[in-house]
Image (cartoon, rainbow, N blue to C red):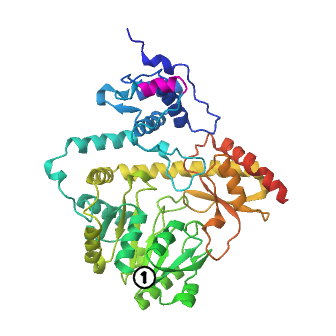
Amino acid sequence: MRPSPDRHLRGFAVARDDTIPLYRQVYEHIRTAIRTGQLRPGDRLPSTRTLAHRFGTARGTIDAAFAILAGEGYVVGRGPAGTVVRPDLDSRTMAGAASGQHLPALGPRPRLQTPRPFQMGLPALDAFPRKVWSRLVARHARGFTPADMAYPDPTGYAPLREAIAGYLATSRGVRCTAGQIMITNGYQDALNLIAGVLLQRGDTVWLEDPSYPPAGEALKAAGATLVPIRVDSEGLRVSDGLAHARHARLAVVTPSHQSPLGVALSLPRRLALLSWADAAGAWIIEDDYDSEFRYVGRPLPALKSLDGGQRVIYAGSFSKVLYPSLRLGYLVVPESLAAAFARSHRLRHLGHATLEQRVVADFMGAGYFARHLKRMRALYAARRRAVADGLSAVFGDRITVDLGPGGMHLIALFTTGVSDVKLAQLAQAGGLSVEPLSSRVTKHACGPGLLLGFTNIAETVAPAVCRRLRRMIGSQLDNEV
């Protein structure tokens, strides 16, 4: 009789004081068992409930580990039959792994990148409701009809656009119709679409300084002339934009939570920005990238909610609220531009894949989306506090941790004139995904600091992660004293 594969997982225990997330530890153990031949092609893995009980973790932790294993092609789901090691894994490949040889990539599938501590821009992947999501995916896959295989609407799946319109009206104060919404392949695709419709080579664009670098890169690639506009405690200095480039074609802003400084654009400046756009015949791109995650009071209304002159193009994305590899975003365009944007969409492509759009529409319509955001706000508030406390404990008065009212990252500001680029390099060499604040600056310096994402750092490991950062950069800080 073939021995039960369950025995190969019995000796494993998670290390709760380790800086490696629990789901990553489970993933590594199972992957090693497969690569060394202890788990063989076709072997059935224990259920997530069984493994969660054995390791003393939440089932979501096991789900996250299984998701990575499935994504890399090591396991496949068999519905009620459970999860098994992929039956078509090459036995010679497994034998090579058992003898210590390098394991080749499994077909053309690229390796997924596991989040590193402090990585920016990622939601809490370990807390995603994968079970609900998988059930919705399976439901839509089973219900696939011949009509669903035809060319899709280039502007996006209609029920999803309707769900987005309803969500924006209640949560962001944005009143729009489904016809004004264009589904995109994320924010970068949205910028390319906007540039194709509204920009000509040489047009001037206001860009916040500091800013989100890929936005400037996309617009510059489209031939725009970028004018960096200083950001202070009230957001974009509209008066500076008027002084330097009054006749600009576009302004790109993050008014609810400036990227990366975290400040909100004040009401007087919002009104001044809208007044400028009306007078100049200019357009404003509102990147509302993580406005859902506010920990003090309710989320701020969108700039678009004040847009009486219809000069604001509102950009949203599911990368921060669901997960990045979904590659779904959307634009809300003024009615006067809807036809031009729809035409450009048709010329650029014949529509996006609809399965994911259908699942998101169902996820929103059934109420899962609202509940997920509520859970994430509570989780992020706790993780943010844990990381901030951990940083204060290990660095003391050498740093000031900027705890803004919202967002998915912290800014650690230093009391000495240390190079944040050097500190970031040291941290990155030690496996920490830390970014220097100065790397986001084009022209107007705002002081040294480190940008630290906290969403994927569990409360239990936050102190250890902060101690690890101290070990990586402490000597450099000491030299600056």
Which is nearer the eye, 441 or 182? 441
Which is nearer the eye, 186 or 257? 186
Please provide percent x and percent y for residue 360: 32, 52
- Viewer can see residue 257: no
Q: Residue drawn at (51%, 23%), measured in percent from left and top?
A: 98
Please provide percent x and percent y for residue 82: 34, 27
Please provide percent x and percent y for residue 63: 43, 36
Please provide percent x and percent y for residue 437: 64, 64
- Find disc 1 in the rendering and name its residue: 201
- Image quadrant in which you'd find residue 16: top right
- Report the number of numbered marks: 1
Which is nearer the eye, 97 or 363? 97
- Viewer can see residue 410: yes
Judged from this view, the residue extending furthest toward the top is: 1
Reply above or below: 3 against 446: above
SS at mark 1 in the image: loop
Q: Amino acid at mark 1?
A: Arg
- In this rendering, would 145 be left or right of 307? left
Magenta stretch: helix, strand or loop mostly = helix
Locate the N terminus by quadrant.
top left
- Image quadrant in which you'd find residue 40: top left
Q: Residue drawn at (28%, 62%), measured in percent from left and top?
A: 161
Part of the protein shown in magenta: 92-100
Reply above or below: 328 against 176: above
- In this rendering, would 415 be left or right of 176? right
Neighbourhood count class around disc 1 (C-alpha, 10 Å): few under 14, some 14–19, many 20 upward: few
Judged from this view, the residue extending furthest toward the left is: 146
Reply above or below: 184 against 200: above
- Is residue 359 inside the magenta stretch? no
Locate the C terminus by quadrant.
bottom right
- Is residue 97 inside the magenta stretch? yes
